[in-house]
Amino acid sequence: MSAFLALLKRDLMLSVRQGGALGTALGFYMLVVTLLPLGLGQDLNLLSRIAPGILWIALLLAALLSLGRVFSSDHEDGTLDVLATGRMPLEMVVGAKALAHWISTGIPLALTAPVLGLMLNLDIAVYPLLMATMLVGTPAVSFIGAVGAALTLRSYRGGLLIALLVLPLYVPTLIFGMAAVNGLLGVSGTSAAMLILAALSLTSVVLCPFAAAAALRVQMQ
Amino acid sequence: MQLVAENLVLERGNRKVANDVSFTLEGGSGLVLTGPNGSGKSTLLRALAGYLRPASGSVRILDVSGSNGGTGESCEVGEVCHFVGHLDGIKSHLTAAENLTFWATYLSDKADSGHSVAHRVYDALEVFALDALADIPAGYMSAGQKRRLGLARLLVAHRPLWLLDEPTVSLDTGSADILVKAINRHLRDGGMAIVATHLPLAIEPARGISLVRKEAQA
């Protein structure tokens, strides 16, 4: 357990020291959300209706940006080889790194959403629920993304390939994330969608480390 | 402890790089791998560490310590080895001490519980003459200093088996002596070391295995 915490702490420390990953993700998130109203026009009713969808999709794209570095920076400097020795299984290494990605990217993106919601004329009453769905749904984003990052570890231009591999797998998270928000807006039940969203996240937290570790073992040969 | 490799056949991209390698390494002894570029030294080390699955044959660690011949149980080599490859495994945004503290915590074992992490890190830095650089980010270090920092990892956590792939690359002669001393001390304490090298290193007691380059096979 101390090895798991040490790795988690190191990854969080590196994400603070390097700085670039979170800054890029947040900047991208803000730009996408800023550009969309400019393209869609000034219909405030339209904007507030589609705002949760815009925020969710932009969050997925922004989180993707930093996924490529989850394993590749450790692979390039030889750290991954050493992490694979030692008593902690590779599955736990993946778990620690995906958890660090969620804490350093998923949570800040979710917390930024209300600020951007202002620009989209989103009803203030929706903010807490929107943030809750994002906090519950983003672990799936990081853990499923880790599988894509592991599969594309040694491929040239892996970043684009990750998007192709991983975005389709985000569909369930997006659907139920939106369903939970729309429940408050009076379309369907919120709690059922929220529970399914939590189940998606928990399932990916449990299963994805095994898939990603298997992919890493092949890539490290 | 005993490392047993039996009839190892290793392939890289359908090309055989090692054919039928067998050896037994007892605790307290070293093995020096020599051979020209492309003869399979790195591949053999990666296979021993468990990164590369052999096409056939096996690698095992047997516990034969103690008067009754030990438990005779075998375990994964990856769990009991230090692997130092061509890359140092050093984060350039962390200082030397932070890098080693991470590895000391991550790799620490039951055998290390006698000393605190800070103590082990300080000792390792001192052995490799890095104590003056402890608070400098590794990104500002020279290639040789980074190499020493990578090698200092060997000392912050106990592992019976050291797998070293050309550890003297970019080291000056003084640092290479420090490394050889560290390896010999490890062997005296009953450890094992397998070193791939092009330089003659004074590792005692050590046997040698010389690998030859295979021609490409269709």
Image (spheres, coloured by chain):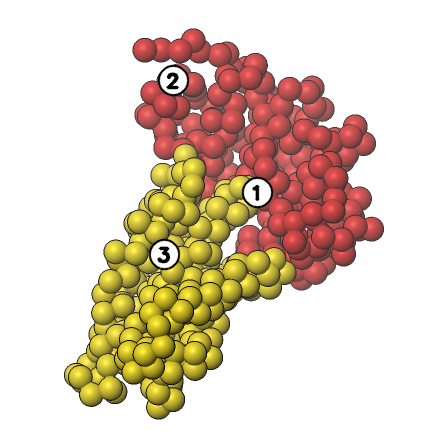
**Which percent across, then down, holds residue A110?**
42, 74
Residue A105 visible in image? no
Q: CA distance from mark 1 to mark 2?
A: 27 Å
Do marks 2 and 3 share a chain? no
Are there few (<14), some (14-19), or many (20+) residues within 10 Å of tag 3? many
Instruction: Please name the residue that numbered disc 1 is placed on.
Output: A77
The label nearer to you, 1 versus 2, is 1
In the rendered structure, the residue with mark 2 lies on which chain? B
In the image, residue A191 above or below residue B187: below
Tell me the element at label 2.
strand
| Colour that chain B carries in the picture | red
Classify A103 as above or below B73: below
Chain yellow in the figure, letter: A
Task: Give the amino acid type for the residue marked by disc 1 in the picture.
Answer: Asp
| Number of numbered markers | 3
Of all chains, the one bearing label 1 is A
Q: Which residue is mark 3?
A: A145
Question: Taking B166 as reference, is A215 above or below it?
Answer: below
Residue for badge 2: B16
Please give the chain letter of the residue carrying mark 3: A
